[in-house]
Amino acid sequence: CIQQNLPDGVGCLFGPAGGIWLSCVALDYLPAAVAAMLIGLQPIALLIITGIMERRIPAPNSVIGSIIACTGAAILLLR
């Protein structure tokens, strides 16, 4: 029973910590606007990866939200 839940526990522990660490690395090595755009686009990457892994089409609302997020990030980056 513990062995079956071990990958979930490892993902729960290292997933958020790894994301925060990578955000800090991006802020150290990239301009703040570029790093903020990459951090903000993370849910879109997750939407794509989840769609591929689960082999299903994302909901239309998710796609529309992703397009709005990409557009907003591009506008902020171009300013």
Image: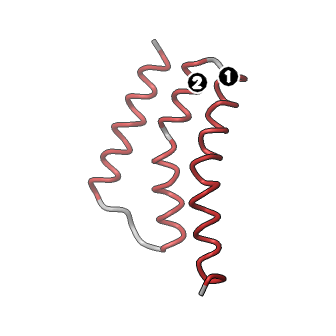
Q: Is 6 or 28 nearer to us in this picture?
A: 6
Q: Could you tell me residue 78's position as x and y percent?
A: 48, 16
Mark 2 in CB contact with mark 1 (< 8 angstroms): yes
Quickly name the residue at label 1: 30
Q: Is 8 or 43 nearer to us in this picture?
A: 8
Q: Residue furthest left?
A: 61
Q: Is 46 or 19 nearer to us in this picture?
A: 19
Q: Residue furthest front?
A: 2
Quickly name the residue at label 2: 34
Q: Residue at x 30, y 47 (%)?
A: 64
- Mark 1: amino acid: Leu
Q: Could you tell me residue 12's position as x and y percent?
A: 56, 60
From the viewer's perspective, is 38 left or right of 70? right
Q: Say few, some or many: other residues with alpha carbon within 10 Å of mark 2 (under 14 / 14 to 19 / 20 or more).
A: some
From the viewer's perspective, is 63 left or right of 42? left
Q: From this view, report whether residue 32 is shown above or below residue 58.
A: above
Where does the C terminus fall, quadrant-wise?
A: top left
Q: Residue at x 60, y 39 (%)?
A: 20
Q: Residue furthest bottom?
A: 1
Q: From this view, report whether residue 61 is shown above or below residue 56.
A: above
Secondary structure, mark 1, is: loop
Q: Could you tell me residue 18's position as x and y percent?
A: 65, 47
Q: Could you tell me residue 19's position as x and y percent?
A: 60, 44
Q: What's the CA distance linking mark 2 and mark 1?
A: 6 Å
